[in-house]
Amino acid sequence: MKFSPTFWIFAYFILGVIFTYLAIFYAGEYGVWSFWPLINMALAAYDFFNAYRMIELRRKINKMKNKK
């Protein structure tokens, strides 16, 4: 089953928000430079980057559809 880029934009963005929240929570518990906040920050950055890539993919697809 294929999902549209719009679905992935929302999925990655929601995951990025969740991991950002967890990073803030763990930073309060363990300190900013401990293991768990850093892992969650990295996962949040990865998810936000993928959401941005899906936005660009969606723009390219729409440009190709409008070109025809």
Image: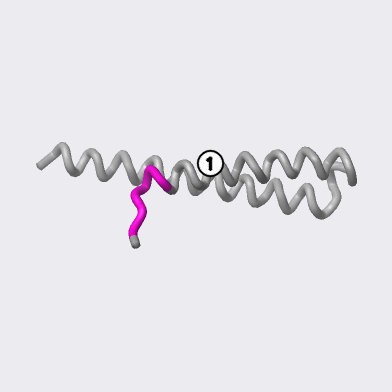
What secondary structure is marked by label 1? Answer: helix
Label 1 sits on residue: 13
Q: What segment carries the magenta color?
A: 2-7
Counting labels gives 1
Left or right: where does residue 2 sit relative to residue 37? left
Left or right: where does residue 31 sit relative to residue 18? right
The x, y position of residue 19, in whole percent, is 67, 45
Identified by mark 1, the residue type is: Phe
The x, y position of residue 8, in whole percent, is 44, 48
Left or right: where does residue 54 sit relative to residue 17? left
Residue at 26 percent across and 45 percent down: it is 61
Left or right: where does residue 28 sit relative to residue 9? right
The x, y position of residue 53, in whole percent, is 43, 46
Residue at 85 percent across and 50 percent down: it is 34
Q: Residue reaching furthest front?
A: 1
Which quadrant does the C terminus fall into? top left
Q: Residue reaching furthest right?
A: 30
The x, y position of residue 16, in whole percent, is 60, 43
